[in-house]
Amino acid sequence: MKRPITHTIRHLSSALLLIGGILCSQNLWACEQPEVHRYGFVRCLSDGLSGVILPNNQWGFIDRTGELVATDYDSVWDFNDGLAMVMKDGKYGFIDTTGQIAIQLKYDWANSFSEGLAVVVQNDRYGFIDKTGQVVIPLKYDGAYPFSEGLASVEKNDKRGFIDKTDKVIIPLTFKRTYNFSEGLAGVYQNGKWGFVDKTGRIVIPLQYHDVSSFSEGLAYVEQEDEWGFIDKSGKLLIPLAEYYHTVYPFNDGLAIVMKSDKTGLIDKYGKVIAPLQYDYIEPFDDDLTRVEQDGKVGFLDKSGKVVIPLQYDDAWYFSEGLAAVKQNGKYGFINQTGQIIIPLQYDDAYPFYNDVAVVSDSSTGESFYINKQGERQYQLGKPIFSSVGNQ
């Protein structure tokens, strides 16, 4: 599906961080961070620690005060239940919140812990370890996926099913593809069709769809013959099939983003169009307002579908701490949620506010630095950060 240029560029930063192994599940910048300004990039706090890029381009962790507690990893992930996955020289393991290695870096690949267990891989065999590093499900599968709602999808000989945490097969490995359980149901695929099973393996919604999503807020979108609609957990079609070629995101706060003829809009759970299908891109709501793009211009909608800030900017970030970075005529500044310009459009790049400061860049001096909400310069970073990603 075609994406607007603004969307593509803004999400390149997420892609780069994912490659580095440090993309968090939260919005890239929407998180608490230590009030430390001597690092070029500071990750979200998780379990009281943040990943940082060190001067030698390696990764480490700092605490809330900025004290370094772990150093020299090629990639790091967020802490989860006291452990963080780290990678060095192509091997994966886990450290604890003191920076000590809790599980040796010996795996060819791993996943963060979910429901107390983590997927690990050695010699193309998949299994699960617990938080002590003990192998609790042998590395015997061709594929494995994180536990969700007490069950995990595993694969052998191109067939998938579900096991519990004792490695007991709960749903036989008979399916070609599977989704994780969500709201008590999991999507399963066989013979070119998708349907849903419950946790006993009973098919509760027949395998009749070309594509489906996981359930969210009681609804899942389904596709038949290039037409999309929404079903409830009984399989009842609540929002009739129509030529919504792709539902960009599932329901969130009662709204879903839908697309028709390359135009995007919003519908509610009754199928009522809240925002007309006229936009090139709508960002999922993360606040009371969300970014929309049409004909190369960006503005903001509220949850009623009303345009609150006209589509007049060339680029924009989402709102954070009451302000959003916007671009016009090649320069960035900041507006509030009424659209009033609070910090003049004078920077070559800008990023969202967190902890009352934002990073901005000035190409004329080759500098990036922090400003406060009055636009006053606070801390210098040096050369512009992410300049090849954030600028168009």
Image: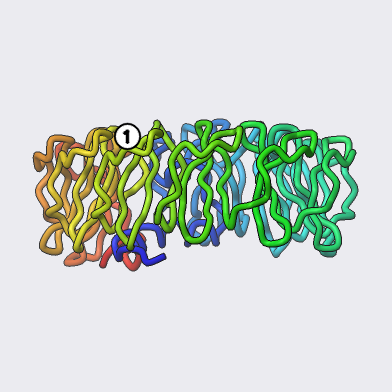
Res. 346 in view: yes
Which residue is at 83% across, 50% downward?
A: 127
Label 1 neighbour load within 10 Å: few <14, some 14-19, many 20+: few
Q: Identify which amino acid the numbered label 1 is placed on.
A: Asp
Front-most of residues 50 and 270: 270
Res. 106 in view: no
The picture places residue 174, in percent across and down from the top left corner, at 82, 53
Please state if 193 lies on the left or on the right of 215 as rendered.
right
Which residue is at 50% across, 36% downward?
A: 45
Q: Give residue 306's quadrant in the image.
A: top left
Q: Give residue 373's quadrant in the image.
A: top left
Please state if 339 lies on the left or on the right of 48 as rendered.
left
Please state if 312 lies on the left or on the right of 218 as rendered.
left
The picture places residue 273, in percent across and down from the top left corner, at 29, 41
Front-most of residues 126 and 303: 303
Looking at the rendered image, the quarter that the N terminus falls into is: bottom left
What SS does tag 1 mark?
loop
The picture places residue 128, in percent across and down from the top left corner, at 81, 45
Q: Give residue 366's quadrant in the image.
A: bottom left
Give the number of marks. 1
Front-most of residues 8 and 104: 8
Which residue is at 51% across, 60% downward?
A: 225
Please state if 306 lies on the left or on the right of 43 as rendered.
left
Q: Which residue is mark 1?
A: 287
Which residue is at 73% across, 57% downward?
A: 190
Q: Is residue 223 above or below residue 198?
A: below
The picture places residue 7, in percent across and down from the top left corner, at 33, 59
Q: Is residue 255 above or below residue 121?
A: above
Q: How is the image coloured?
A: rainbow
